[in-house]
Image (tube, helix red, strand yellow):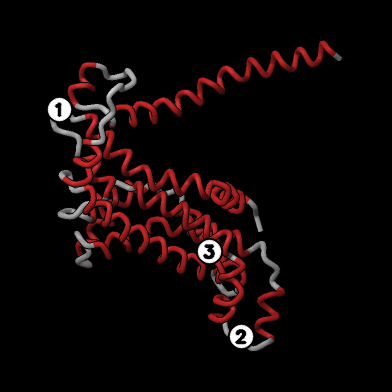
Amino acid sequence: MAAVQTREKRILWILSIPMALLALSAVYPVYFTINAALKTRKGYVLDRFGLTTDPTFVNFSQAWNQSRLSEYFTNSVVVTVGAVIALLVVASMAGFALAILRFRGRKIIFITILVSLMIPVQVVLVPFYRTMIGLNLIDSRPGLIIAYTAFFLPFSVYLMTAFYARLPRELFEAAQIDGANLLRVWWHIMLPMGKPALVTLGILNTLYCWNDVLISLLVLQDQRTLMVGIAALRGEYTTNVPLLAAGICLAAAPIVLIYVIFQRQIVNGIAVGAVKG
């Protein structure tokens, strides 16, 4: 018995080494970014990797004010909130229809949605851009909201369909017997019962929209979102690394906070999508 316990301890120690290295590889970039943001440009050049002994917050104020990150932050908040609300409403309605209702072509629509998840965004950028120009939606916040809604809708519909498919159909049939129409069934029954999936979907879509650079760069030209503004802090020949690191910290702080608070819901939502109803 003692020999078996000794062997198990050795195996755990052996497994802990690569796990510790993996954790270090994830933590070190965070340490490096925060540490660099607290240095002056001269201090960073003299000692790039050492721990700062004289921290300063000048880079944060300069990035926020002089580099217009406050304006870009507002743009990101507006388009992210607008896109997430649109995605939740449309995905919830579509998921309810595909999971509960019975109509011709329902399976074909769902299969089409699944296939669209496999298409890379880069493949459709040219027709997407031409369509946005034709609709006069370039360089406008509503245009970016519509673009985010279109690109992230397939996954959102899939997740809500998977969740609603797990609910008993008797709830829908009982509401119909009581005389409720489809809109009332969705609003009073499906929407409240779908709250766990909606919370998860809202968090995931917030992460997607907030961190996006490619779609935002195409749609907003004179204006910018926060992530595009952070990318613009890099110079053509030289880069003020402490200023760039401070911008990255400012951009990542809201997302890190959201993830820390709602990480359980994110994991549960992914598990929901993996279960067949």
The x and y percentages for residue 139 are 19, 59
Q: Is residue 244 left or right of residue 275?
A: left
Label 1 element class: loop
- The quadrant holding residue 141 is bottom left
Disc 3 to disc 2, how far (Cα)? 28 Å
Tag 2: residue type? Ala
The x and y percentages for residue 198 are 53, 61
Label 2 element class: loop
- Residue marked by disc 3: 108
Mark identifier at residue 65 = none
C-beta proximity under 8 Å, tags 1 and 2:
no
Q: Is residue 257 left or right of residue 60?
A: right
- Residue marked by disc 2: 180
- The quadrant holding residue 3 is top right
**Residue extending furthest front?**
54
The x and y percentages for residue 108 are 53, 64
- Residue marked by disc 1: 238
First along the sequence among labels 3 and 2: 3
**Residue extending furthest top?**
3
Disc 3 to disc 1, how far (Cα)? 53 Å
Q: In this view, does 163 lie above or below 266?
A: below
The x and y percentages for residue 64 are 22, 45
Tag 1: residue type? Thr
Q: In this view, does 203 lie above or below 239?
A: below
Nearer the observer, disc 3 or disc 1? 1
